[in-house]
Image: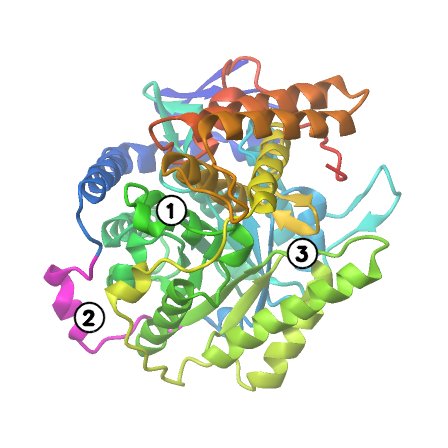
């Protein structure tokens, strides 16, 4: 169904019950204004990403920009955080489906990051119903009964503070076009949420808070600042009403931490160590250099030198500038009926959070409500105040330390594990789920990106496993086929799931075997979802056991 809206805005997606409230005339006019004002700059920045990658491929070396040395040397701080973002010791993250929103708000965490990005497949239903769910949660109108379990869900009185992560600058929302051009997924998610909820958030004593993903540099942060200020002007909001946390999850951004904070200093409250995407970015940005081949994904922990340097630099810069330094995600989740595995997972979570809080982080992430008490106990024990911003952490990190490749082995099990996780995850993503439990971990797009990027890197440079297996194109193609067949056997009798597994296998094969490195796997996967906008794919279930 095509719906023509104000100012040449076309909606290429079904208008299900409730959608017209979100996609109202005034909301779409607001969105169209953001698009017309900022789309050209967004496209320019995306072209600059490609140009910068070409420079790196040709031998340019990442470094701290000399032209911004005065910003790094000067004495300045960001605007203080609002009261409900002062204490962020434990945050939970997850997609924007109705049950997840209620459970996360009730989890006991200080904040909930409602994720339109890596934890959500951007099918039309997810993106618009997610806006409905957040609107209803803010107004405490989200009560519902699960038809499967009969359980009643409602938000309790001490709910977590809501923070929303829109999609990154690189993603379009193809179901909405202005003047025939798809709008930015970032502006779609941000604009609709802000437009509909800024008044209701103020009434609750909170505000429109956002996590900003995938920024590569200060220029991309500047664009967000321009968007924020223009949106505040359009809606009659005071400067600084919109507050943001920037995920430091790309390698180039680590060289511009001060600059990113400076560009957003009236709106920013924190930086966050987005560890999984950061590892992916390390592979992607250094892909032309065989001296930066990584070992098994499981060996690239936060304690390896380049990851340790990254987290210490985030803490040091944040505290100097008066911002929170948020730790990263612990992806472990409980496994039903396996007490031994659960105890091992809890121990790993505790160890990870202890490292973060003693290093100086002001908060951390978990992926499951059952892990909130564990992380909370660690931070309560070691962080007596609301945060540790006043505790200066002096850490001089060099460019060499940020780029140093870790030691470690590539194993046959690591290769197979990457193939297995990538196929399972992509199949689930195509089926409408962006956060997927796989082998005791909550996987999202970032971990699948690491898996496929490592396979590409190992094939490209003729790596061998520690047992001597040569990771050639033929070998990897054979293993992809064999593992895919094994996964399909688990879906016996489910033809729709088998088809998604076959599609996922084809996508993975193309990504691994391509001579060119695909910037994000979600872009060709989005092509699968939106091949025919008049008949968009609908949300389907994907079996948890896969």
Q: How crowded is mark 1: few (under 14 residues within 10 Å), some or many (20 or more)?
A: many
Q: Mark 3 points at which residue?
A: 104
SS type, badge 3: helix
Q: Name the residue under label 2.
A: 72
Q: Is residue 255 magenta?
A: no
Q: Name the residue under label 1.
A: 283
Q: Which of the two discs, 3 and 2, sits closer to the camera?
A: 2
Number of numbered tags placed on the structure image = 3
Q: Quadrant of residue 332?
A: bottom right
> Which quadrant is home to the N terminus?
top right
SS type, badge 1: helix
C-alpha gap between disc 3 and disc 2: 37 Å
Name the spot of residue 27 as percent of width and height, x first.
45, 36
- Quick one: which residue is furthest to the front in this view? 468
Q: Which of the two discs, 1 and 3, sits closer to the camera?
A: 1
C-alpha gap between disc 1 and disc 2: 27 Å
Residue at 49%, 74% (x, y): give it: 362
Q: Is residue 490 left or right of residue 193?
A: right
The range drawn in magenta is 63-81
Residue at 49%, 25% (x, y): give it: 474
Q: Which of the two discs, 1 and 2, sits closer to the camera?
A: 1
SS type, badge 2: helix
């Amino acid at each position: 169904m095509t719906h023509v809206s104000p100012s040449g805005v076309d909606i290429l997606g079904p208008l299900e019950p409730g959608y017209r409230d979100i996609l109202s005339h005034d909301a779409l006019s607001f969105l169209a204004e953001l698009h017309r004002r900022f789309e050209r700059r967004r496209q320019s920045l995306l072209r600059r990403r490609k140009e910068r990658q070409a420079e790196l491929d040709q031998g340019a070396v990442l470094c701290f920009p000399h032209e911004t040395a005065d910003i790094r040397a000067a004495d300045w701080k960001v605007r203080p955080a609002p009261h409900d973002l002062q204490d962020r010791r434990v945050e939970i993250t997850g997609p924007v489906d109705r049950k997840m929103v209620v459970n996360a708000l009730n989890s006991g965490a200080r904040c909930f990051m409602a994720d339109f990005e890596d934890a959500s497949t951007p099918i039309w239903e997810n993106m618009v119903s997610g806006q409905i769910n957040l609107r209803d949660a803010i107004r405490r109108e989200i009560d519902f009964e699960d038809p499967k379990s009969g359980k009643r869900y409602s938000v309790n009185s001490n709910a977590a503070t809501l923070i929303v992560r829109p999609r990154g600058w690189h993603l379009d929302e193809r179901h909405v076009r202005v003047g025939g051009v798809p709008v930015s997924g970032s502006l779609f998610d941000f604009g609709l949420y802000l437009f509909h909820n800024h008044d209701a958030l103020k009434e609750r004593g909170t505000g429109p808070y956002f996590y900003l993903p995938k920024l590569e540099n200060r220029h991309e942060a500047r664009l967000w600042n321009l968007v924020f200020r223009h949106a505040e002007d359009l809606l009659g909001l005071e400067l600084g009403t919109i507050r943001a946390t920037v995920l430091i999850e790309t390698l180039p951004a680590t060289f511009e931490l001060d600059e990113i904070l400076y560009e957003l200093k009236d709106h920013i409250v924190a930086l966050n160590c987005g560890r999984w995407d950061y590892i992916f970015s390390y592979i992607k940005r250094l892909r032309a250099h065989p001296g930066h081949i990584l070992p098994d994904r499981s060996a690239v922990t936060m304690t390896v030198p380049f990851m340790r340097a990254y987290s210490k630099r985030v803490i040091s810069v944040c505290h100097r500038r008066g911002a929170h330094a948020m730790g990263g995600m612990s992806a472990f989740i409980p496994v039903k009926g396996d007490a031994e595995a659960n105890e091992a997972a809890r121990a790993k979570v505790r160890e990870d959070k202890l490292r973060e809080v003693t290093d100086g982080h002001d908060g951390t992430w978990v992926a499951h409500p059952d892990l909130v008490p564990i992380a909370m106990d660690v931070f309560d024990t070691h962080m007596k105040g609301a945060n540790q911003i006043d505790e200066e952490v002096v850490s001089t990190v060099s460019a060499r330390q940020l780029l140093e490749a870790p030691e470690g082995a590539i194993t046959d099990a690591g290769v197979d594990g990457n193939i297995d996780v990538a196929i399972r995850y992509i199949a689930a993503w195509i089926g409408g789920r962006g956060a997927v439990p796989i082998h005791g971990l909550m996987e999202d797009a970032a971990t699948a990106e690491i898996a496929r990027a490592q396979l590409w890197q190992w094939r490209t440079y003729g790596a061998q496993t520690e047992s001597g297996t040569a990771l050639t194109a033929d070998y990897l193609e054979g293993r992809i086929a064999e593992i895919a067949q094994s996964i399909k056997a688990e879906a016996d009798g489910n033809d729709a799931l088998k088809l998604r597994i076959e599609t996922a296998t084809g996508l993975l094969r193309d990504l691994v075997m391509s001579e060119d490195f695909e910037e994000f796997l979600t872009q060709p996967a989005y092509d699968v979802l939106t091949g025919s906008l008049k008949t968009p794919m609908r949300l389907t279930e994907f079996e948890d056991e896969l």
